[in-house]
Amino acid sequence: MKQHAISKILLSFQNSESFDGTVLAEIIDIFRAWSDRISTIFIFDITISIENFQEKLPRATLRHLQGIVFESTDAEETLDLLFRAITSPNVHGQLRIGSALMKTIIDRQLEHIQSGHAFIQAVKYAYIIHYFTNPLSILTDRNDSAGALQREHYEVIRDLPSFRRCTQKMVDSKELDKVQSLLDDDEILDKFTTTLIDHGQKSLRGILCALDVASKIQSCIPEKLSLRWSELYIKGLSANLANSNFIRDLLLSVRKFPSDTMHTLLEALSQTPNLATAIRPIQTALRTLTAAHPSSTTAPLRSEHDLRHHETLRTTIVAQKVSLSKHKATLSKQDAAYSQLVARVDTALRTYFNEYLIDPKDLVFHEIFIHDARASCRDVFMPAPRRAIERALSAPHDYLNCECCEGGGKGDAAALSSSQPATAILYQLYLESGALINIADLWAAFSAVVGTEGEEEKGEAEKKDDDDDDEERKLALFYRALAELKYLGMIKNSRKRTDHLTKLAWKGL
């Protein structure tokens, strides 16, 4: 602990009711014996009552504990806080992670219940992959790329799908000279690239600001909608929010806001770029209206869209039949004026969302400032160890890169050879067998393969002297390879026949 400068030890027990009380008591007693040198903190996840948990521990152990009860934060809420800190529009980053790759990271985090540190490491790896595999990533910061571009960089720029779509639109609009200059002149292409990358990064930040506006509206709704910031980010960068039911429900809720909730919303939106100029005059008008409202201290103003306060049910009886009809009450002057302000807010928000909730893949050069390549991260985020093990045992030459493991011929890495590792030989014999494997037959086949090396060059006397040593060596290799296959979970002892093994895994399944 002195070497690593650790002053305290924190032990966390999830689902502590499943632990045996005796085991918990022994752990606590062991650390209590070191309490004069090591400060220890225990965290117990208790889903039942504290009294039932205390009954599991002896009284002598409980005397040494000083407990504090608190409510833990939900793992999804913690993940959402971390996600917002990374993707917030207030974070001025030149590179953003795309919706598909970010969804892969989020799903991996939730399915495997990993820590927040693992999520941060995954995001860091995604950024590293982009900067190390994309030669155009240098263009995300023009201060670093000034004078660093080579001829090959411009050729890669011209091969980008977004650039090709852009030039095709220019051709359709008869801007042939501009297209020709972009294809022939690197300096013109450099200026064109710089301008559109800056425009794309600003547009991407506008998308994030629009998502932040939607999140602020969501926080003002009493019955909160179920979209977290991570879900908003993924839907927004997938272009699934514009004209969606979610935005429609948000705007409908805004039209029903009373004056006090509307004041809170306008205060939150007054600092939003590109929206503040439209919101601040409405905010000033709302303050003036509420100040003149005679009952502003008791009841807020209501808009005409708030049907709960402006519609009543009327009951009429005709010929012994009861009929119900809705009746819309007459608005007061203050409510009518407030309804006009609500309509202005609705128009401003609708225009803002339509302008900034765009598809980021429509931006030219989005491949440079948006990293959305899942293929480059899939093997790291979702590794397939079984497939790697099967390939290593089937073709050891691919990993060892030696001539002795190439097998029966050049390019035939799967053929049996005595120079291959013993586990690889036994695995290839294992693949040729059925569901039940006779150990004696497996040993005979293994001994025949391993014993073929150099047998033709030896004389009769030399073969006779080495038989005993070779038999012991081959038997040792066989048992070691068999133990390794058992450790990998490929075979087990058969319950039906004591001299047989049961096959547990088939290649490719």
Image (tube, grey):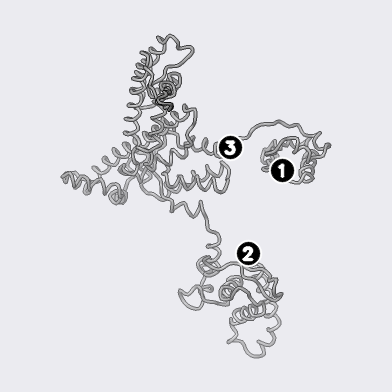
> Label 3 neighbourhood size at 10 Å, few (<14), some (14-19), many (20+)?
few
Distance, label 3 to label 2, CA atoms, is: 36 Å
Closer to us: mark 1 or mark 2?
Answer: 1
User: Mark 1 touching mark 2, by CB under 8 A?
Assistant: no
In terms of depth relative to the viewer, which is nearer, 76 or 488?
76
Q: Is residue 143 visible?
A: no
Residue sitting nearer the eye, 80 or 365: 80
Q: Is residue 321 above or below residue 55?
A: above
Q: Which residue is mark 2?
A: 489
| Quadrant in which residue 265 is drawn | top left
- Mark 1 → mark 2, Cα distance in angstroms: 31 Å
Q: Which residue is mark 1?
A: 17
Number of numbered callouts drawn: 3
Where does residue 197 sit, x and y in percent of width and height? 32, 39
Residue type, label 2: Gly
Which quarter of the rendered picture does the N terminus lie within?
top right
First in residue order: circle 1 vs circle 2: 1
Give residue 297's position: percent from left, percent from top.
48, 11
Q: Earlier in the sequence, mark 3 or mark 2?
A: 3
Label 2 sits on a secondary structure element that is: loop
The first of marks 1 and 3 along the sequence is: 1
Residue depicted at 47% across the width and 34% down the height: 225
Q: Label 3: state its secondary structure.
A: loop
Q: 207 or 400, which is in the foreground?
A: 207
Q: Amino acid at mark 3?
A: Asp
Where residue 167 is drawn, which disc sits there?
A: none
- Residue 464: image x %, image y %? 68, 88
**Residue picked out by circle 3:** 74
Q: Is residue 339 visible?
A: yes
